[in-house]
Structure formats: structure tokens, C-alpha cells
Image (spheres, rainbow, N blue to C red):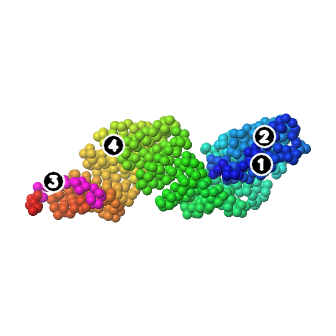
Amino acid sequence: MGCACLEGECSDLPQAGSYFRRALDKANELMLFCEPGNPLSMATRAFHQFSDQSCKSLYVYQRGEYDEGMHGYSEPVTLISDIVSTKNAAATIKFNLGQLYLRLNRDDEALKSFIGCLQVGQWASECLGKCSTSGGVSLIAVLHNIGHVQYRSGHYKDAIKTYTNALDILRSTHAQDQNKVTLWALSGTLNCIGVCNFHLPKANTEKALAYYRESLALRRAVLGENAVTKEIATSINNIGRVHYLRGEHDKALEYYSEALTMRRSLFGNNHLDVAATIYNAGQTLHHRRKLDEAMTLYEEFLVIAKNRLGYNHRDVAAMLKCMAQIKHECRQVEDAAKLYREAIEVGRAALGEHHPEIASTLNKLGNLLYESNDLEQAVKVYQEGLQVERMVLEHDHPNIVVTITNIAQIYKLQEKYDLALNLYREAVAIQRRSLDSSHPNISSTLSSMALIYYRTRRFTKALEVYQEVLRIRRDAYGDVHVEVAATLNSLGLVLFKMDLHDFALQSFHESLRIRRQLLGPNHRDVAVVLYNLATCHLECGDDDNAMHYYRETLKVEKAALGGTHPDVVLTLLHCGQVHQGRGELGAALEFYDEALEAHAKGGSDDKSGHATLARIFNHRGNVFLQRGQAKELVEAMTLSLRHLRLAGKKENELVVSGFNFYALAKKHPECPAAA
């Protein structure tokens, strides 16, 4: 949440650097006394003048505008003439140069300056070995600044080592002098180590929390239990962030509330530290699904950010995206799309056209459009995001794979199967390069490819890919896992289509065993496998087993979904078909009538609902044809045709079949041709 600098603010910082370098050259030649008018004095004044208007660096999580307690020892040091030495002067100038480079975001040069200061300090331990000196640079200050550069450059483990060196020195010093100055320095160092543990790629929340709590306890020991300072507020805010990261949202909110009260009392309502805690609390409420409360805090953050940072700032863009996500989750599609687009516009103004955060927001917008079934626009937005990702991310970055597979999924839905397959192949190639050969993500992409092969009737290829998926998932999860069961079910479907019914049945039975073990007997996924088993037995001419498994399917579906679910209606229809095929017409009609009743209570009036009704009436009509009941036949077929039209299907999809055509023809002879 930062920028390089606001235009015009840092105009005198290069001049300060020039004075520091001139002073350093002079210090290397002779003993330097800090008299009015010499280069060091002028440099120090220039540094102080702009210390509150410094250029901020970008942080991974929270940036320089927001206080994490990492800015201790950030003031320049002044030389006092009666204790100055050449080495002391050189160390001081290097330290101040390092501070200047930090404000100019020139971290490499800052680090060199601080390390140079440290090296000089080894020669002049009298001015660097103490916790705090008058007229010299402390060793703790140098270590803190080295740690700070390492931290904001993302080298958290190195930063932890550096801060720990400072901590060891401070603990040793405190054991000897027991003064509050050392105790206060200890609290700041503990906080810095906590922050670095928090920011590790895999956050060490246990250590971070322990360091934060010790830091807070020391600060309260120095200032009093009820003291209200920015350092104490920062410690409390940092503790809240650990609880948030650990998913302990109630605890996080307690700490954020306390920190927010303190920060409002210290800074008022328009301060960036207040905004940081508002954002944190809003984010926590968002995760707790208290969306109205979260939106209120997000809106307050946005007001502060616009006022303090300007409209075209990355944090304004980030907050617009958060607000869009709430609208997205509430299915307020137009409002969400508007906010996503505004976030993209602001982000581009703040960060440029090509930045990971722009790609992220484009993908969020693409998701919204996809969920709204606006597939053409979704593809365009995903492709725009993919173009940005290819420019700013590594070639094998997982975000690129996600976007590629999102586009492929849309092509699959649009039945543009060749385009989808090309993208899935690219995604798998990236995954094979960047992931372990048995990584589950590879199996997910391969499974999508296998489904396309299945739909396009390339069953041999589908079988080959599903077998690889099964191998990967068994390696990753073991033999008893829901993903393994799903793959076995898919394999069974492919084998069924290849007329390898015995192998298909084996696959279905294994899937059924795993799903019952993991999901229980009355889960919808169990019903799916039972249905497939019934269909496979029916295809083999084994009506008894087919009917057994259809009844089992019906039992599970009613328990899992209720008696009026569309899946129940379809299973009732299939039960009727089995009885009809066996000539048990009365039993068939009972199932068809039950299907009609279930549909009337819970079925939809969309095209799929009308298509289901057309099938039921069609089958009932064929039963009446077999019985020779002409009146009922005509009524049923008429209703079937009506629902076919409402479903958007062709009338020639009506199927007429039966055994009693001759008797029907005798009772209803053909009419003469129309005049």
C-alpha cells in the first residue's frame, strides 16, 4: 500500500545525499568537527526537514504508510564536536546515508551504507557498542536498519537473524543495567522479530504471537498497564493480525477493536494507522460473513485512503476490489461489476497497465461474468488478465494455470472442444514443469481433458487419461479418498461406453464402496454411483439387478435431496421404464404417476423441467398404446408434444412404440384425405 513519492516532496533529498557524500570524503581525510555551516550540519538539517515526507517502499502485506512498528531508529544522528573522531564521523555519515537511501527506495545502496557503518563500528566500538549514545551511532540502531532493509526486501529469514543479534545484545545489556531505555529497545526488537515471522512465506504464527505478546508486556511495564501510545496500539493490532491469519476471527476482532479505539484517540479519524485497523476489522467481518458491517468499514477506509493518499492509489484500488467482492457474494451483479471495473481503472492509474494486482482484479471480474453466464465477456476479461499475467509473472506461475483453465472451462461449456483441449494441454505442461509428478493439481487438469475426450466419443483416449488421473490421485491421497472414488466412477462411465461392462461394474462397485465409507449411505454422490450401476445392469439385460439398484438410488436420493428433487423424478421415470420393458404396465404407470406428482410439487418450469415432463408423458402414452387405450394415448402424446415445444425441442423427438398397433387401427381407422 505505497508509492514512490508524491510529486515535489523529495526534491531536496538528493541534495542531502550530495552533502553526506562530501562529508564522508572529508571524514576519510581528517578529523571532522561539526561546526555550523559544514557539509554534515547542512545535510542533517535537510534530512530532518524531509523525514516526515519520506518516500515509502512497497511491502508484501502492508506497506510503509501503515505502521507495523518497523521504523525504530529511523532518525539521522548528529555529531557532537567534543567527542567526535574520524571513525565516529565516518560511521555517522554512513548511517545517515543509509537512512537517506531508504527514503529514496534504493535498498541495495542503503544496505551497503549500513554494513559500512557496522564495519566502521568494529573499529570504533566506543561509539557503537552501546544501546544509545549521544553524538554517535548505536550498534542496535545499525542492526535494526539492516534488518529493516532485509525485511522490506522480502528476506525475512535474514532479517530475523539480524534482529536476533540485536536482541541478544539488548538482553545482555539489560541484565547489567536494568534501565527502562534498554527495556524499551527490547520491546521494539521483539516486535520486529514478530513481524518477520508473520511475513514468512509460511507464517510462523506461534513465534510471531509469542514475540508480539512479550513486546506488549514490556511496553506496558515501561509505560503502565493503562497507557495509550502508538507503539502499544501497534502491538495490539499486530496480535490481531496473527489471530486473523490463524482463523481465530473472534479473538482478532477483540484486538482490532482495542487497537482501533486507541488509534482513534491518538490520531483522530483520518489517520492511515486508523485506516489500517479499520481494514483489518473489515476483512475479519467479511470472513465471518457479516457483510453489511464489513462494507461499512470498507467504505470508511476508502474515505480515509482517498483523502490521505489520493484517488489513484493502489490501496484505493484494493479496497474497491474488496467492496466488489461483497457485492459479488451478495449476487448484486451490476454493482459488483461496476466496482471491479473502477478498481481496475484506479489500479492501472496507480500501478500501470501490467501489474499482478490488475490481473487479479480482472480475474475476479471474469469470475463474476462467468457466474452470470455472460461467457463471451468472461472470456475477453480472462484473456486480458492472462495477457497481464504473462508479462509480469514467471512462465510457470500457478496464477497463469488458473486463468488458462478458466478460459478452457468456458470453451468446454461452449463445446469449443479443440480450443479447450489446447489450453488444458498448455496448463498441464506448465504444471508438469513446476509441480511434482503426483501433484493433485495435475490430475484436476487431466480430468477436465478426459471429460472432453469422453464427450467427443474418443473413449480410448479418455480411458488412457483417466487411468493416469487415478494413478496420480492414489499416489497423492491413498486408495480411500473422494477424488479416487470420483475418478473410478468416471472410468466406469468410459468403460460402459466401450461396452466393457464387466470392467465398468468393477469400477462402479469400487467407487460405491469408497463413497459409502467416506460419505455415509445417504449421500447424493452415493446415489450417482447406484444409478450408474443400475444403468449398466439394464444395458446388460439384467433387469432384476437394474431394478434393485434403481430402487436403492431412489431411496438414497429421497433421503439426501427430498422427494420432489429433479433427480428423484428422473429415477422414478427410469423405474417405470424397466417395468414397461418387462411388460409390467400397471407398475410402470404407478412410477410415471409418482414422477408427475413429484415434479408438480418441486419441479421447475424452465426448459429442462418441460423436457422431463415431455419424456414422462411420452412414456405414459406408449403404455396406453400397448394397452390399446386410444383416448389416454392421444391425451398423453398431446401433452408430451406441448412440453417438447416449451422445452425448445423438435416435435420429431416424440417416440411412439408399443405392441397393439393392429387393435388400435381397427378401432380407429385412418381418416380420408383432406379436401
Q: CA distance from mark 2 to mark 1?
A: 13 Å
Residue at image location 81% in from the left, 47% down from the top:
42
Tag in front: 3 or 1: 1
Numbered circle sitting on residue 659: 3
Measuring from the top left, give residue 662's x and y in whole percent.
Answer: 11, 55
Secondary structure, mark 2, is helix
Start-end of magenta stretch: 643-664
Q: CA distance from mark 3 to mark 2?
A: 105 Å
Q: Which residue is at the front of the view, 505 or 209?
A: 209
Tell me the quadrant of the picture where the C terminus can be found: bottom left
Return the disc, 3 or 1, that comes first in the chain's sequence: 1
Residue at image location 55% in from the left, 61% down from the top:
291
658 in the magenta segment: yes
Measuring from the top left, give residue 635's x and y in whole percent.
Answer: 20, 63
Secondary structure, mark 3, is loop
Tag in front: 3 or 2: 2
